């Protein structure tokens, strides 16, 4: 279990998302050297990506350089690079440039990727919302469509100004509310000669309600609020295929639309598939109750990549439903993995992971949100929004980001303005900016 002669015990953390950051930071006083590996040079605060996509915040506000986070952690080093596969027996990783990296302990926290479910055209023509690149691409694409319609009034009614969002979960709901607000308050003023009322935001959900994991009353409130803001909510409608300028539904309806945002699902990062261990249907790695791989106490898997055992009872197949793919699950899992690594070095036995539910929230628009908290507490409207605001500010990494976000939110709130609507010189194509990995099943 000790590191190789002359070396301290080496812990490699793959992924500097919520889970990986929590693990690496919690090891700051442990007698180990930590390498934090990520394919990107920044941590992304994914819950606020929709605000970048809808011009409420800038990329810098919700992303933080990983080297900046670990600059003062003396036992940590940061390495930029994509892990291609893991050799569990040989205890080393192979990077996409062919180099290898040995570990004594490994924490895998590579997160999840957009799941297109193999629906034709999604990969080619829709935008995901998993990375900063995705969010910037949506924003640029939508702003350019408004510029086009401004130059050619015929485009007002041909779908150029229509955004279809697939998926009525929190991401789809937040995206729809944010876009409706951007259109009606900001772009209406930016394009005074354009009848912006013709711009449509259509939210598609395959089941009979929005926000499936929330209480039905909160879900109903969310639907009503979105509809009042001008969003067309279509329930029990599924996407059959996406074309460059239209979305075709399984019931045969065609919605002319130049923009489609795919918020209909994620699956675990494909790195899990390289391990040769048991995976769930969604590709999540099956771990023991201590979050380690069965029979491999030196490998922990946390966050969206892991099927962390939940508190629920076993289903008819004997399987316990895994914990949801949420930031709080990843953070607490990262802390637990770090505690297990440090404990094992002291000769302590592993302990089971116990998740403390912090609740779930979704904003619907200006001073409106729904929140479902532990103990059956449900908040909505301005109270829910305030709770959402405080929680996201507290969770944001780094004081500079917090201050920026607060100033931007105050500005947006008081002026109905959105400062972040610069169009870069070249428009990025859908799904081209999302290293690492994308699932198409
Ligand atoms: C749009 C959106 C909104 C969300 N809103 C909420 C919310 O409101 N509340 C909530 O609790 N959760 C929310 N979530 C979910 C939450 O963001 C995730 O549960 C959380 O990020 C999972 O953390 P993680 O550490 O497992 O993975 P991530 O945070 O995704 O981090 C994974 C990291 O691994 C890196 N990586 C991946 N593959 C490799 C590789 N091969 N080599 C090296 N590095 C790699 C990535 O670059 C990334 O930095 C949201 C997610 C999205 C997409």
Image: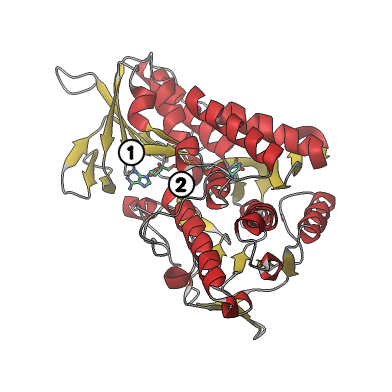
Q: Which residue is under mark 1?
A: 41
Q: Is residue 347 above or below residue 246?
A: above
Q: Is residue 1 visible?
A: no
Q: Quadrant of the N terminus?
A: top left
Q: Residues within 10 Å of mark 1 (few under 14, many from 20)?
A: some
Q: Which residue is under mark 2?
A: 305
Q: Residue at x 51, y 26 (%)?
A: 351
Q: Residue furthest right?
A: 217
- In the rendered structure, the answer to whether residue 181 lies left or right of residue 348 reads right
Q: Residue furthest bottom?
A: 252
- In the rendered structure, the answer to whether residue 166 lies left or right of residue 69 reads right
Q: Is residue 256 visible?
A: yes
Q: Residue at x 23, y 18 (%)?
A: 8
Which of the two residues, 437 or 279, is positioned nearer the viewer here? 437
Which of the two residues, 232 or 80, is positioned nearer the viewer here? 232
Q: How is the image coloured?
A: secondary structure
Q: How many marks?
A: 2
Where, by quadrant of the figure, is residue 156 drawn? bottom right
Q: Is mark 2 within 8 Å of ligand 1?
A: yes
Residue 14's spot in the image, x, y percent? 35, 38
Q: Secondary structure at mark 1?
A: loop
Q: Nearer the viewer, mark 1 or mark 2?
A: 1
Q: Secondary structure at mark 2?
A: helix
Residue 180's spot in the image, x, y percent? 68, 57
Residue 56's spot in the image, x, y percent? 58, 45
What's the distance in space between the residues labelled 1 and 2, CA to CA?
Answer: 20 Å
């Amino acid at each position: 279990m000790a590191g190789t002669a002359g070396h301290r015990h080496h812990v490699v953390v793959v992924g500097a998302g919520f889970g990986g950051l929590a693990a690496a930071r919690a090891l700051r006083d442990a007698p180990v050297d930590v390498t934090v590996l990520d394919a990107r040079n920044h941590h992304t605060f994914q819950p606020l990506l929709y605000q970048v996509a809808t011009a409420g915040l800038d990329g810098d506000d919700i992303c933080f350089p990983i080297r900046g986070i670990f600059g003062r952690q003396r036992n940590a080093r940061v390495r930029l690079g994509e892990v291609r596969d893991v050799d569990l027996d040989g205890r080393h990783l192979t990077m996409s440039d062919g180099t290898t990296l040995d570990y004594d302990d490994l924490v895998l926290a590579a997160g999840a990727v957009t799941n297109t479910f193999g629906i034709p055209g999604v990969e080619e023509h829709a935008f995901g919302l998993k990375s900063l690149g995705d969010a910037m691409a949506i924003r640029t694409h939508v702003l350019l469509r408004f510029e086009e319609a401004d130059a050619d009034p015929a485009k007002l009614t041909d779908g150029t100004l229509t955004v279809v969002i697939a998926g009525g979960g929190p991401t789809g709901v937040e995206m729809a509310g944010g876009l409706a607000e951007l259109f009606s308050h900001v772009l209406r003023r930016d394009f005074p000669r354009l009848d912006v009322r013709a711009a449509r935001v259509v939210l598609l959900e395959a089941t009979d309600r929005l926000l499936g994991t929330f209480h039905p009353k909160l879900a109903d409130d969310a639907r009503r609020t979105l509809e009042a803001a001008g969003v067309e909510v279509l329930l029990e409608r599924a996407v059959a295929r996406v074309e460059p300028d239209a979305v075709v539904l399984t019931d045969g309806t065609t919605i002319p639309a130049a923009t489609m945002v795919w918020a209909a699902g994620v699956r675990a990062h494909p790195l899990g598939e390289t391990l040769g261990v048991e995976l769930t249907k969604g590709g999540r790695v099956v771990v023991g109750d201590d979050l380690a791989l069965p029979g491999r106490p030196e490998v922990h898997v946390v966050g969206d990549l892991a099927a962390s055992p939940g508190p629920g009872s076993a289903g008819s197949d004997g399987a316990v439903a895994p914990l949801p793919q949420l930031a709080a699950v990843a953070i607490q899992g990262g802390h637990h993995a770090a505690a297990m690594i440090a404990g094992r070095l002291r000769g302590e036995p592993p302990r089971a992971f116990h998740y403390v539910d912090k609740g779930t929230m979704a904003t619907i628009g200006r001073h409106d949100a729904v929140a479902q908290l532990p103990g059956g507490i449900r908040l909505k409207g301005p109270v829910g929004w305030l709770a959402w605001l405080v929680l996201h500010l507290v969770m944001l990494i780094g004081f500079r980001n917090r201050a920026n976000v607060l100033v931007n939110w105050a500005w947006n709130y008081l002026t109905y303005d959105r400062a972040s609507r610069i169009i870069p010189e070249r428009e990025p194509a859908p799904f081209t900016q999302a290293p690492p990995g994308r699932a198409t099943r």
